[in-house]
Image (cartoon, helix red, strand yellow):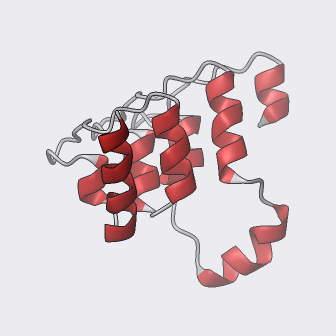
Amino acid sequence: MRMSLDTGANANLAIKNGGTPLMLAAGGGPPRSQEDEVVDKAARADPVEVVKMILDAGADVNAANDQENTALHFAALRGNDKVVQYLISRGAKIDAKNKQGKTPAEVAPKRTADVIAKLAKKD
């Protein structure tokens, strides 16, 4: 990823459904099985660092796919509190609604929804 971005890859380039590299890094990829997680964990980068790298390359933190989900929706859905916190610190809209009319907090597990609520009170 870093090499692609360093050589000028478009950090906002979307696939057919509107998904972006940022959405994938935030948790928008296919879920992994428990076995894949164990085998692959050592080789994977810290998701916050990957998200930071993509945003630093010019990605739109509030870009939405064809279902109007943002990277924050995906991170919240996966319960990835660190990525949620980082995206919000970089300007992700807490009140963005997808096509189902749901905000990131509404698609998140309770723990992550609580994190989002606390961060919303700080603003």
- Name the residue: 45% across, 28% down: 91
- Name the residue: 34% across, 68% down: 109
Lateral position of residue 20 relative to residue 98, left or right: right
**Quadrant of the rendered image containing residue 57:** top right
**Is 57 placed above or below 73 here?**
above
Q: Looking at this rendering, what residue extends furthest in the left direction?
A: 101
- Name the residue: 51% across, 61% down: 30
Lateral position of residue 74 relative to residue 21, left or right: left
Q: Position of residue 74 (x, y in %)?
A: 42, 51
Q: Looking at this rendering, what residue extends furthest in the front direction?
A: 122
Q: Looking at this rendering, what residue extends furthest in the bottom direction?
A: 35
**Is 48 placed above or below 36 here?**
above
In the foreground, 119 or 106: 119
Q: Quadrant of the N terminus?
A: top right
Lateral position of residue 14 relative to residue 62, left or right: right
Q: Position of residue 111 (x, y in %)?
A: 38, 68
Q: Quadrant of the C terminus?
A: top left
Q: Position of residue 7 (x, y in %)?
A: 83, 19
**Is 16 placed above or below 25 here?**
above
- Specify whether residue 75 is in view: yes
Q: Position of residue 46 (x, y in %)?
A: 73, 54
Q: How many marks?
A: 0
In the foreground, 39 or 110: 110
- Specify whether residue 69 is in view: no
- Name the residue: 76% across, 70% down: 41
